[in-house]
Amino acid sequence: MAVENSWNSTKLLATAVGSGVVLVAVAKFVRRIFAEKPKEYPKDVVILFQVPRRAISPNLSPFAIKLETYLRMAKIPYQNEYSRKMSPKSKTPWIMLNGKVYSDSQFIIEFLNKEFNVNLSKHLTPKEKAVARSMFKMSEESLYWAFILSRWVYSYGDPTILNIAPFNRYILWRIKFHVARMCYYQGYGRHTEAEVETICRQDLKALSDHLGDNPYLMGNQPCEEDCAVFGMLAMMWMMPETAFAAKIVQENDYPNVTAYFERMKNDHWPDYELQT
Ligand SMILES: N[C@@H](CCC(=O)N[C@@H](CS)C(=O)NCC(=O)O)C(=O)O
């Protein structure tokens, strides 16, 4: 009797597994049939994949604003593709050029410099280039983390940023959880909010002290590194979050940083009107 029962259970299990396998295979087959055909894009035009534009800012990602500002500054032909699809490195933005995919805003800029023979920083000496690099790395590797903590963790996200219904807290909660975890492993997420605010202010003060009366990061002429710094400032200066980022902008302790941000916006985004 016991042997028969166990034989029956094995048969049941095998049937269930078999049906599961068949169902998965059918689902894959149907998906393949209805899958979107790869789009045709024009030759030698950079296709910039980024999340959809917002009423308040050209993009939610500072790296997308950096890349699009660079494409505009370098006058490289490009076309936007608004998509939530991530790069093979699971990040946004990314590009496609003549059917090939390239990831990471900085690697993309370095690739495009070679491909389109561009050098927006050729007027800089090696020493100036080193300073420009330290400024853009400070923006991307320090200010960025302070800012995303302010936006997604301390503000707990603002539904207006994502254009989602106010009750759709689940999406905000998922982003908050993801960002908090990333920031914890990066390190800033282990600090208190007050400590992170101090870091943010110190970075902005360093940028302000460095800029002085310069219209651009490295003097009278913009350079490649301006794109990254502008992209990061756009996050704070164009977004309506609460928490410390918005407070810092409202207090306007760094008027030359505000003026620099406005100058870059007017130079490269005359078509983009702040709609808040
Ligand atoms: N180093 C990358 C950073 C890109 C990046 O961190 N993008 C964020 C949006 S601002 C992202 O895709 N986050 C998704 C995730 O981390 O899962 C670049 O320069 O492109």
Image: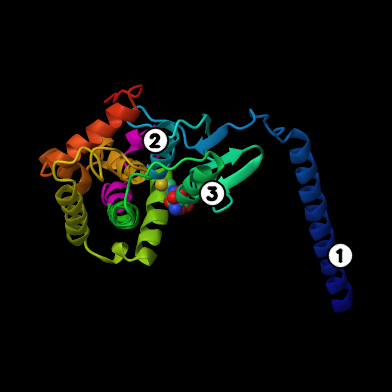
Q: Mark 3: which secondary structure?
A: strand
Point out residue 259 in the picture as x, y percentages from the top left corner: 18, 35
User: Image check: 149 left or right of 112?
Assistant: left
Q: Is residue 247 magenta?
A: no
Left/right placement of residue 248 relative to residue 152 reads: left
C-alpha gap between disc 3 and disc 1: 49 Å
Which mark is first along the chain, 3 or 2? 2
Q: Position of residue 46 (x, y in %)?
A: 55, 34
Q: Give the residue type at disc 2.
A: Thr
The total number of labels drawn is: 3
Image mark for residue 69: 2
Going by the image, does 67 lie left or right of 9? left
Most foreground residue, 121 or 168: 121
Crowding around mark 3 (Cα neighbors within 10 Å: few <14, some 14 to 19, many 20+) is some
Q: Is the residue marked 2 within 8 Å of ligand 1, measured from its CB?
A: no
The residue wearing badge 1 is: 11
**Real-space Cα separation, disc 1 to disc 2, in angstroms:** 63 Å
Q: What is the magenta range?
A: 147-168
- Estimate the x, y position of residue 37 in percent, counting from the top left: 72, 32
Which of disc 1 and disc 3 is earlier in sequence? Answer: 1
Nearest to the observer: residue 203 or residue 21: 203
Q: Residue at x 78, y 54 (%)?
A: 20
Q: Give the amino acid type for the residue marked by disc 1 in the picture.
A: Lys
State yes or no: residue 155 in magenta: yes
User: Label 2, label 3: how many angstroms apart (C-alpha)?
Assistant: 17 Å
Disc 1 within 8 angstroms of ligand 1 (CB): no
Residue occupying image coordinates x 42% and y 31%: 72
Mark 3 highlights which residue? 103
- N-terminal label among 1 and 2: 1
Report if the CB atoms under discs 1 and 2 are less than 8 Å apart.
Answer: no
What secondary structure is found at the residue carrying circle 2? helix
